[in-house]
Amino acid sequence: MARDNQGFACHVSHEMVSYEMHHIWPLGSHGPDTPDNKVKVCPNAHSDIHYLMERLFRGKLYDARQYAPVVRWLATRGYEEVTAYAESLAAS
């Protein structure tokens, strides 16, 4: 997702669009509301990231070729943050 002075380029349509703020470690899963946990993404990417995270949590397969690498990376990173947090709670 490239950012320039005019707006934010959508990873799907490559058109300039507004962006949404995505929390890598979701707030609903006890993620922090800090600058280093936020990333600007286009609305399409935001939807895709949450969809893929849900599939990862449910252990369901998905076709990785359908999603941009950054979408897959952010979904995986969020999943890893949540599972690490859950493991740390279970260990304490």
Image: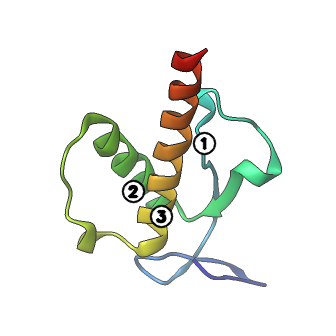
Q: Position of residue 37 (x, y in %)?
A: 71, 49
Q: Residue furthest front?
A: 91
Q: Mark 2 or mark 1, which is nearer the start of the sequence? A: 1
Q: Nearer the viewer, residue 87 or 15?
A: 87
**Quadrant of the snapshot with the C terminus:** top right
Location of mark 2 (residue)? 48
| Whether residue 3 is situated above or below residue 46 in the rendered picture | below
Q: Secondary structure at mark 2?
A: helix
Confirm or deny contact between disc 2 and disc 3 (CB under 8 A). Answer: no
Q: Residue at x 56, y 42 (%)?
A: 81
Three-letter amino acid code of the residue under disc 3: Trp
Give the foreground label among 2 and 3.
3
Q: Mark 3 or mark 1, which is nearer the start of the sequence? A: 1
Location of mark 1 (residue)? 25
Q: Secondary structure at mark 1?
A: loop
Three-letter amino acid code of the residue under disc 2: Asp
Q: Residues within 10 Å of mark 3 (few under 14, many from 20)?
A: few
Is residue 49 at least partly visible in the picture?
yes
Q: Residue at x 55, y 65 (%)?
A: 42
Location of mark 3 (residue)? 73
